[in-house]
Amino acid sequence: MMNDNENMVSDAVAQDMELTDPQGSEPQSADAKNAQEASSNDDFHRTGRMQLYVRRFMRRPSAVVGLVVLILLILLAIFGSKFSQWSYDEPDFAALASPPSAQHWLGTTVGGSDMYAMIIRGLGRSLTIGIFSSFGTTIIAALVGTAVAFFEGWFEKVGMWLLDMLLVVPSFLLIALIVGMAAGGSDWLWLAIGLTAFGWVGYARTLRTLTLSLRDREYIRAAKFMGVPSFTIIVRHLVPNLGSVLVINTVLGVIGAVNSETSLSFLGLGIKAPDTSLGTLLNAGQSVVQTSPWVLVFPSVVLIVLTFSVQLIGDGLRDAIDPYSRSGGKAE
């Protein structure tokens, strides 16, 4: 009997020891354990979507290099003229077709214009046209493409018919005519407007195809059922869900617009003297490439570097936004 009592006492003591910590503190209650688990969960921080995109983008060295180069080119286009004693419209008649020297860092043209000042002006003008046209094209294409897909029935049929008709319009010639009629130094503005007016059509068709998979989602149907205006649904729900595609194509659209401007100006159908752009400089350099090669080489190098940097940024954005990217992490 005594042995049984001693066993019962020893079992009770063992149970009390299991409920206490090694220091002999009081046993933890269920509330204390829940509070401890909650505090440990608070230490876990979720990564926001934008923060995740930035982190993935910064993990790609080539994209970072492209971003740095593009920023340097933009700063050069804005502040580069402050480092030169010559203006783009101020020729030096004592140095006609002069090679690079201490006075003219990148040489001069046949007319005596300083190539450094001309490239700074041309780079700024080409970037202005490219950015203006790319953003305008993206906005128009996003609204039209999503609207054509959102409104079914006759509206979608008419919208697709108009898009197909606009695709066969000779936009290159029409833009050249629009710019040719411009006067008073406003040719760059009309060129940007022309590139925007005819550059959104193919992009809108692509966005319309992507929107077809969104218009039947539950939240879109719920918004329709609640009587939310159609324009509000397009702007608040459809367009934001295409944000990744819009961002990538906006960045790459800058290069597309710059290349279009360069092509038109190279053919003499874009920016006209006394203003200048990269295409105008290439047009002037191709006729004197054998006697003054620097007139063609330096603008070509700037255009290649600009195109390559934006291409690297576009690839980095595509890799950062891609949910199946090799970069680790999961957006909240």
Image (cartoon, rainbow, N blue to C red):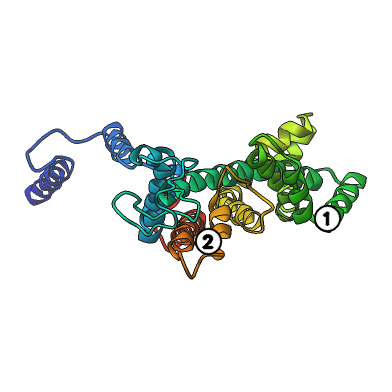
Q: Nearer the viewer, residue 258 or 181?
A: 181
Asked if residue 64 lies left or right of residue 198, the reply is left
Separation of residues labelled 2 and 1 (CA atoms): 32 Å
The residue that mark 2 highlights is 285
Return the x and y of residue 286 as percentages of the image width and height.
55, 65
Badge 1 amino acid: Val
Which structural element holds mark 2?
helix
Q: What residue do we see at 66% from left, 43% from top? A: 192
| Circle 1 SS class | loop
Residue 27: x and y in percent read 18, 36
Along the viewing direction, whichever of 149 and 43 lies nearer the viewer? 149
> Which residue is found at the position 72% from the left and 39% from the top?
182
Q: Is residue 68 left or right of residue 219?
A: left
- Work out whether residue 115 or residue 231 is closer to the camera in this orientation and state it: 115
User: Is there any visible trace of residue 47 in the rendered image?
Assistant: no
Q: Is residue 5 above or below residue 267?
A: above
Q: Is residue 218 above or below residue 309?
A: above
What residue did someone put label 1 on?
169
Specify the quadrant of the image occupied by residue 32: top left
Q: Which mark is residue 19?
A: none
Mark 1 closeness class: few <14, some 14–19, many ≥20 residues within 10 Å:
few
- Let me know if residue 187 appears in the view: yes
Amino acid type, residue under disc 2 in the picture: Gly
Looking at the image, tell me whether mark 2 or mark 1 is earlier in sequence order: 1
In this picture, residue 227 sits left or right of residue 310 = right
Q: Are marks 2 and 1 in contact (CB under 8 Å)?
A: no
